[in-house]
Image (spheres, rainbow, N blue to C red):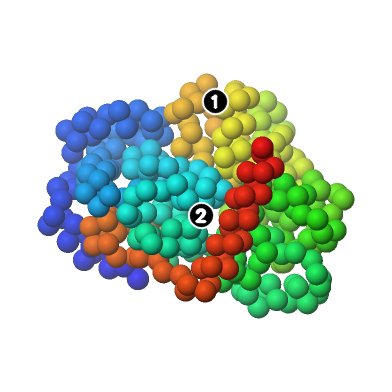
């Protein structure tokens, strides 16, 4: 576990990180991307960290990849690439920098390392995990293969490198239905998210989709009843759900898609009001770019994603600690599964 007190003292000795209205004003162009969701006082606190990180990543020849669930100060302030799991996986294959800092959770950093074995991949907090990734093991994959002999295993990217290596191909929430539909087998195993699998099964009715019993702690807590009640209260609100939600929740929504799909949808449709049935930072990160939309309603916070902070990012670049390593044999198997996903996704889009 990181010693935050010692880290703060060390960083304070090397960088001027005191809240500063002067720095906040100097970085005003960055602040305009999050002005709607971040008070000026908070920005004066964050701005010195943003300035230090952006300067240090140039010195380290580093690039920062950030998931859509990162907080606005990370998403808008320091990220070079933002996106969902598929977008980040694809962009990781294009990285030319020597160092990748993964602002997300551990499996994402593993994926970047798998795709860039010669590069240094840092994660600001090694304990930034994922309920899905922690809920399945290679033994779980082997058990599913025994139950459904000959069926290919489609594993969600929200898994460890070992689980990816035990699989045939990976998927993300944005391409899961296309990946399953693109396989020749009649029966397909999906792991570990049972709700994503159930939602895919309805989209690909000509396949028998079977699944592992896993779920996301953020999305499993939404209920169809609360969405019905919210729609009754605000009937003019567009409800947009992530496919990791239970099928009855997705059925209540006007649209369901990955985080990238959600952003595309609200950008295209421009509803007056929108309820994003996913992690809380989604609405915060796109709010200023879509001033005509009022984002309303409940959301659930991911405690794992929120382990990544500006202070921890600065520490990772300063100390170069938190390097992610993957066993070479495991990495090769996982790389094949991830690359098959990327290749098939590209072919299906062509």
Q: Which mark is residue 328?
A: none
Q: Nearer the viewer, residue 2 or 94?
A: 94
x and y, in percent, of residue 17 in the image: 18, 48
Residue 79, quarter of the rendered image: top left
- For the N terminus, which image quadrant? bottom left
- For the C terminus, which image quadrant? top right
Q: Is residue 22 above or below residue 160?
A: above
Residue at 35% across, 61% down: 120
Badge 1 is on which residue?
293
Looking at the image, the residue that sits furthest to the left is: 13
Residue 173 shows in this picture? no
Locate residue 181 relative to residue 217 in the image: left or right: right
Residue at 33% across, 55% down: 99
Locate residue 292 relative to residue 244 in the image: left or right: left
Locate residue 229 relative to residue 343 in the image: left or right: right
The reply to whether the C-beta atoms of the residues labelled 1 and 2 are less than 8 Å apart is: no
Tell me the SS state at disc 1: loop
Q: Earlier in the sequence, mark 1 or mark 2?
A: 1
Badge 2 is on which residue?
302
x and y, in percent, of residue 242 in the image: 64, 45
x and y, in percent, of residue 185 in the image: 82, 59
Q: Nearer the viewer, residue 259 or 40?
A: 259
Residue at 51% across, 54% down: 302
């Amino acid at each position: 576990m990181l010693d935050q007190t010692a880290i703060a003292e060390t960083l304070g000795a090397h960088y001027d990180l005191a809240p500063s209205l002067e720095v906040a004003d100097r970085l005003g162009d960055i602040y305009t991307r999050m002005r709607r969701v971040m008070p000026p006082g908070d920005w004066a606190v964050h701005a010195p960290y943003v300035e230090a990180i952006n300067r240090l990543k140039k010195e380290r020849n580093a690039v920062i990849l950030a998931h859509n669930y990162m907080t606005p100060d990370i998403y808008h302030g320091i990220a070079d690439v933002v996106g969902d799991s598929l977008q980040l996986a694809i962009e990781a294959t294009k990285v030319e920098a020597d160092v990748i800092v993964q602002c997300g959770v551990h499996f994402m950093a593993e994926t970047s390392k798998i795709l860039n074995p010669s590069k240094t991949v840092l994660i600001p907090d090694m304990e930034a995990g994922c309920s899905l990734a922690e809920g399945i093991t290679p033994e779980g994959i082997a058990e599913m293969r025994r139950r459904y002999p000959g069926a290919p295993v489609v594993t969600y990217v929200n898994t460890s490198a070992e689980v990816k290596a035990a699989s045939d191909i990976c998927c993300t929430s944005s391409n899961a239905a296309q990946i399953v539909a693109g396989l020749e087998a009649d029966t397909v195993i999906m792991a570990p998210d049972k709700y994503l699998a159930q939602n895919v099964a309805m989209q690909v009715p000509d396949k028998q989709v079977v699944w592992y019993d896993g779920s996301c702690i953020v999305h499993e807590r939404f209920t169809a009843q609360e969405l019905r009640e919210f729609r009754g209260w605000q009937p003019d609100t567009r409800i947009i759900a992530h496919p990791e939600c239970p099928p009855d929740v997705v059925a209540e929504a006007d649209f369901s898609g990955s985080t990238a799909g959600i952003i595309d949808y609200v950008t295209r449709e421009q509803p007056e009001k929108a309820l994003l049935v996913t992690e809380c930072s989604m609405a915060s990160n796109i709010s200023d770019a879509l001033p005509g939309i009022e984002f309303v309603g409940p959301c659930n916070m991911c405690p794992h994603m929120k382990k990544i902070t500006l202070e921890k990012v600065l520490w990772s670049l300063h100390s170069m600690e938190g390097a992610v390593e993957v066993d070479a044999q495991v990495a090769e198997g996982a790389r094949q599964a991830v690359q098959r996903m990327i290749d098939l996704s590209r072919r299906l889009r062509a």
